[in-house]
Image (tube, helix red, strand yellow):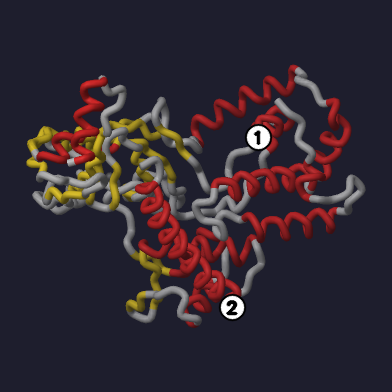
């Protein structure tokens, strides 16, 4: 666990007065506050750090303890105990809604403190900022989904704060799309409503298909002879294999459109985008002498 | 899940929960930043606006930004959000031409 230089974070001198600390904190808070930097994880991290620095340096007792231990701070037993009590507490407050692999979550509420802080000051160290609230905290989570899974409507069970939540993911969901699950955030206070759960979908790339809105793009290799003389090619689509007629004299990079073979349109059943197939013509290599002769003849003809 | 949640809350009640003055909420409305619902001479906040109003409370009480500043920030955040969407769209388009 690394030592954190709170003075450096606030950009102040070790002899800074309480007023200077307050000023420095407010200036940085205006820059990194999550409400001014929506969806910016870096700014949120920075905000948590300056909050933590302010928490320590604006409290005479904590500042004294921090200054005394300084960089020579070590893993003392009492800190370890305090850390454990903090862990128990965190299970109740639950900042990270998702458990288990496959999901990552980010909380933009600015609530998490570093391990360094928790170890030095423990669970009791954190003072309650703006304790009176009404609506419960919103949860932010990210869900990774391979392109082929986004092709069909399917159900998924997520674990949110120990509770299983079954959600339906409609076919055609887009990369970066956010689904709001009302009332699935933290409980409200004083009769206030629950917060909401926001799930951002992260559609991962597919080796064969690229997607733009509802259209799919695929590259298919055809041999030189089929390109010159015409013929057939069997290609893969997300709804199965399709046989295509190749016209004689098909040029390299020719693009054909297969209507309705693209991606399903979100929440419009039966509607599909297009599939664009680009042909790349494979030029034969390692020719035998005989083949070379034939090509030479062709060239002269 | 929970259906007993209020859809509208009286601003006086809302302000007690957040420990703020009702005048702040009224000024947000007067500046056209939020919409309040008037029922029998009482003003209410709709649930849909809770998130937004809470953000303005943070800006005002934590960061000491006045109503005019909040209004300006609101416009800028909308533009930032529009631009972010545009960047996402362009990234997706660009992605199509990469490693092609």
Q: Is residue A282 left or right of residue B51?
A: left
Q: Is residue A224 visible?
A: yes
Instruction: Mark 1: give few (<14), some (14-19) or many (20+) Cα within 10 Å.
Output: few
Chain where mark 1 sits: A
Q: Is residue A197 visible?
A: no
Chain where mark 2 sits: B
Question: Percent from the top left, x then y, of residue A187?
Answer: 41, 45
Q: Secondary structure at mark 2?
A: helix
Q: Are marks 1 and 2 in contact (CB under 8 Å)?
A: no
Instruction: Please tell me which residue is depicted at 17% across the width and 49% down the height of the picture.
Output: A256
In this rendering, is residue B77 above or below B72?
A: above
* Mark linked to residue A114: 1
Instruction: Please tell me which residue is depicted at 7% across the width and 41% down the height of the picture.
Output: A245
Marks 1/2: CA–CA distance: 35 Å
Q: Secondary structure at mark 1?
A: loop
Discs 1 and 2 share one subunit? no
Q: Is residue A273 left or right of residue B48?
A: left
* Mark linked to residue B68: 2
* Mark linked to residue A291: none
Question: Percent from the top left, x then y, of residue A36?
Answer: 57, 60
Q: Quadrant of the N terminus of chain A?
A: top right
Q: Is residue A62 left or right of residue B74?
A: right
């Amino acid at each position: 666990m690394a030592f954190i230089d709170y003075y450096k974070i606030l950009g102040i001198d070790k002899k800074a007065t309480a007023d200077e600390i307050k000023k420095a904190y407010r200036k940085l808070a205006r820059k990194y506050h999550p409400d001014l930097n929506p969806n910016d994880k870096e700014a949120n991290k920075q905000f948590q750090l300056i909050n933590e620095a302010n928490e320590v340096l604006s409290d005479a007792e904590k500042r004294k303890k921090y200054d005394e231990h300084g960089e020579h701070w070590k893993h003392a037993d009492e800190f370890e105990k305090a850390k454990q009590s903090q862990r128990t507490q965190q299970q109740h407050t639950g900042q990270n809604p998702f458990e288990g692999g496959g999901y990552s979550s980010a909380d933009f509420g600015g609530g998490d403190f570093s391990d360094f802080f928790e170890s030095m000051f423990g669970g009791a160290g954190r003072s309650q900022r703006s304790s009176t609230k009404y609506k419960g905290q919103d949860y932010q989570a990210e869900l990774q989904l391979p392109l082929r899974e986004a092709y069909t409507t399917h159900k998924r069970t997520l674990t949110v704060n120990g509770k299983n939540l079954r959600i339906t993911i409609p076919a055609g969901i887009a990369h970066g799309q956010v689904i709001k699950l009302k009332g699935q955030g933290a409980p409200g206070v004083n009769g206030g409503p629950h917060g909401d759960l926001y799930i951002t979908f992260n559609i991962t790339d597919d080796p064969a298909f690229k997607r733009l809105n509802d259209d799919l793009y695929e590259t298919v290799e055809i041999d030189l002879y089929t390109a010159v003389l015409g013929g057939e090619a069997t290609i893969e689509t997300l709804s199965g294999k399709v046989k295509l007629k190749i016209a004689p004299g098909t040029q390299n990079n020719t693009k054909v459109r297969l209507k309705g073979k693209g991606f399903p349109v979100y929440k419009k059943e039966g509607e599909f985008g297009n599939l664009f197939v680009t042909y790349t013509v494979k030029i034969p290599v390692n020719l035998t002498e005989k083949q070379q002769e034939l090509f030479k003849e062709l060239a002269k003809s | 899940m929970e259906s007993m949640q209020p859809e509208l809350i009286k601003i006086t009640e809302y302000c007690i929960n957040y420990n703020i003055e009702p005048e702040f909420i009224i000024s947000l409305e007067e500046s056209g930043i939020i919409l309040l619902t008037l029922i029998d001479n009482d003003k209410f906040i709709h649930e849909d606006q809770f998130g937004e109003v809470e953000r303005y409370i943070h800006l005002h009480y934590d960061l000491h930004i006045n109503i005019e500043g909040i209004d300006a920030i609101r416009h800028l955040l909308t533009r930032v959000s529009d631009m972010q969407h545009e960047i996402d769209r362009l990234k997706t388009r660009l992605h199509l031409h990469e490693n092609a």
